[in-house]
Image (cartoon, grey):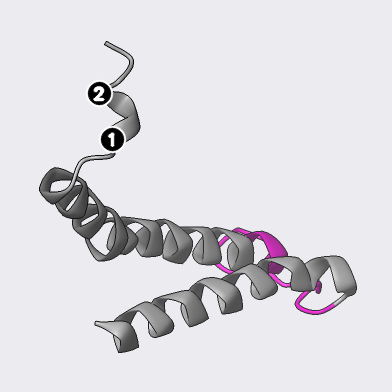
Amino acid sequence: MKRMRKLLWLVICVCLVLTWLPYFGFFNSPNLIGFIPEPLALTLICNVILTLCVLAMYPLYFIPFVNKLNEKPMPWGKDDE
């Protein structure tokens, strides 16, 4: 499970760096990739990958968090009533 989390964060970081490369002059040529300029195509592909990573993060982080909260609820919520 930890290996999957590390791989997921590595993919997220690489995609975020790739989305910034056109601002620094890399992948910033006027070539077209399927009627889309190269920088826009790179950014769109990275955004699709980032969206998939966010969907993959849900079962890795939030489901275990909710399960732990159900096992041991936080005490500060019950005193307010």
Q: Quadrant of residue 53?
A: bottom left
Q: CA distance from mark 2 to mark 1?
A: 6 Å
Q: Residue furthest top?
A: 81
Instruction: Name the image quarter holding residue 2.
Output: bottom left
**Does 80 appear above or below 22?**
above
Q: Residue most toward the bottom? A: 3
Residue at the spot of label 1: 75
From the top left corner, tell me how far across and down residue 74 is, in percent.
28, 39
SS type, badge 2 = loop
Along the horizontal axis of the image, is 20 left or right of 1?
right
Name the amino acid, label 1: Pro
Residue tagged 2: 78
Residue drawn at (51%, 71%), measured in percent from left and top? Answer: 12
Q: Secondary structure at mark 1?
A: helix
In this rendering, position of residue 80 left or right of residue 48: left
Residue 39 painted magenta: yes
Disc number placed over residue 11 in the picture, else none: none
Could you say which is closer to the camera, residue 35 or residue 76?
Answer: 76
Image height check: is 71 above or below 3?
Answer: above
Q: Residue at x 59, y 79 (%)?
A: 14
Q: Amino acid at mark 2?
A: Lys
Find residue 36 and report its image quarter: bottom right
Residues at discs 2 and 1 in contact (Cβ within 8 Å): yes
What's drawn in magenta, residue-wise? 26-40
How many neighbours does mark 1 have within 10 angstroms: few (below 14), some (14-19), or many (20 or more)?
few
